[in-house]
């Protein structure tokens, strides 16, 4: 492996590709009959061909936890951050299914391990869909042999569609950079439309890279990236029982990410960008939503205050409905900030939408209401609150709340 030493930090660029574009990965998807819609893709397999693949994972903080989360969290600890295989199904969450649900997760992992030739502890499982319905593992186990045969780089693009439930479009992203003339990739898929208010991740997201990153450091980098992305998206204020983010690093690009190096900072920036792109897709795809909203809070005395205000504004049904109706009712925004629990002086607050100023010094600036409505009619909005009391900031992504 080669440590990254830069003369010029290379930019991460979005390119065409899939989860299997990073070296060493293959994937496939199929219709296993889990979903009620005949022929709908609902089962996917992601495999790294490198036996030294590093793995990291983050899971829901909901106290009601799905069986695949319990199984995969335990496996991640037992293998000390090593994994090669991810099996994921949609249409059934395998949540609130008791011991039978855990045994189903075990059976699926063991079957996949036998077929791939990997220890069962190096298989991660994930599920999404209806809560409380028993998952028959045979439906998945019986389809795995054919799915293994289909593994390829060409069929990996179907994974983003196979994990969809109420999503209206597949969510995927691939970033590429060439440090020292050697390509390095970061790829990811995600799903989520409803029950989105994670406190650690998103509904489901799977990330791959061909950089070489030690397991413990990969976990640290993933947690930092998630805190700046999936932890900052909300659709409806509900945290799922199944929220999971998995990341696999094959190391086959030959480029090693070393803690404390310039390369580490560059790689982390790319991972944050990847996760933020996916998080914005989730917010944009909120059930019935029409507008993507970025809430920015600046000038707070403390980060905790900025964060509380950003979350309160992003979660406020009154703010979300006002934006849905292109109503410049800024009082709803300031009100949400006020009940957030943050400490700030309301007489110093400035509120802008896409740079259009509504409030200065905590009072109305006498804006043109027709012009404000035109600004709010846009499909992407940035609502900014400047508290003018410090240098701390925070942001969230959310969507409007429409009749749909």
Image: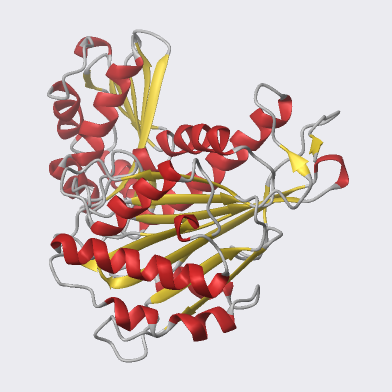
Instruction: Give the percent coordinates (x, y) of residue 35.
Output: 27, 81
64 horizontally vs 215: left or right: left
153 horizontally vs 162: left or right: right
Quadrant into which the C terminus falls: bottom left
- Picture quadrant where residue 132 is located: bottom left
Instruction: Give the percent coordinates (x, y) of residue 195.
Output: 22, 55
Number of dots carrying numbers: 0
57 horizontally vs 373: left or right: right
Task: Residue at 69%, 61% (x, y): give it.
Answer: 24
Q: Is residue 261 above or below residue 400?
A: above
Instruction: Give the percent coordinates (x, y) of residue 308.
Output: 25, 25
Q: Is residue 38 above or below residue 73?
A: below
Q: Nearer the viewer, residue 260 or 167?
A: 260
Whether residue 164 is visible? no
Q: Nearer the viewer, residue 32 or 232?
A: 32
Q: Is residue 118 above or below residue 155?
A: above
Q: Is residue 318 above or below residue 33?
A: above
- Picture quadrant where residue 25 is located: bottom right
82 horizontally vs 240: left or right: right
Whether residue 315 is visible? yes
Task: Residue at 20%, 44% (x, y): give it.
Answer: 62
The colour style of the image is secondary structure
Instruction: Give the percent coordinates (x, y) of residue 66.
Output: 23, 56
Quadrant into which the N terminus falls: top right
């Amino acid at each position: 492996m080669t440590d990254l030493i830069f003369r010029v930090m290379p930019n991460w660029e979005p390119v065409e590709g899939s989860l299997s574009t990073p070296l060493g990965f293959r994937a496939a998807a199929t219709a296993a009959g889990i979903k009620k819609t005949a022929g709908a893709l609902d089962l996917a397999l992601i495999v790294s061909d490198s036996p030294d693949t590093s793995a990291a994972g983050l899971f829901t903080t909901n106290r009601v936890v799905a069986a695949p989360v319990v199984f995969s969290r335990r496996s991640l600890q037992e293998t000390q951050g090593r994994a090669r295989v991810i099996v994921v199904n949609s249409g059934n969450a395998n949540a609130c299914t008791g011991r039978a649900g855990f045994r189903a997760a075990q059976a699926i992992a063991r079957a996949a391990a036998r077929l791939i030739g990997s220890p069962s502890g190096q298989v991660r499982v994930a599920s999404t869909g209806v809560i409380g319905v028993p998952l028959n593992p045979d439906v998945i186990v019986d389809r795995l042999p054919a799915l293994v045969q289909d593994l390829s780089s060409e069929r990996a693009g179907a994974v983003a569609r196979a994990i969809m439930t109420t999503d209206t479009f597949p969510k995927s992203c691939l970033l590429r950079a060439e440090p020292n003339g050697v390509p390095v990739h970061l790829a990811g898929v995600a799903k989520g439309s409803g029950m989105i208010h994670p406190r650690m991740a998103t509904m489901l997201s799977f990330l791959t890279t061909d950089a070489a990153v030690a397991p413990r450091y990969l976990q640290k980098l993933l947690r930092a990236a998630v805190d700046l992305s999936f932890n900052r998206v909300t659709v409806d204020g509900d945290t799922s029982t199944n929220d999971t983010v998995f990341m696999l690093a094959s190391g086959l690009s030959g480029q090693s990410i070393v803690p404390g190096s310039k390369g580490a900072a560059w790689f982390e920036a790319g991972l944050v960008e990847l996760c933020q792109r996916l998080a914005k897709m989730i917010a944009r795809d909120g059930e019935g939503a029409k507008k993507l909203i970025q809430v920015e809070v600046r000038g707070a005395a403390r980060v905790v205050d900025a964060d509380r205000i950003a979350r309160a504004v992003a979660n406020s049904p009154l703010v979300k409905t006002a934006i849905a109706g292109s109503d410049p009712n800024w009082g709803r925004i300031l009100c949400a900030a006020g009940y957030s629990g943050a400490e700030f002086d309301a007489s110093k607050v400035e509120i802008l939408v896409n740079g259009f100023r509504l409030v200065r010094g905590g009072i109305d600036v006498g804006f043109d209401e027709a012009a404000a409505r035109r600004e709010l009619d846009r499909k992407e909005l940035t609502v900014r609150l400047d508290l003018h009391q410090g240098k701390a900031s925070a942001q969230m992504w959310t969507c409007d709340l429409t009749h749909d």
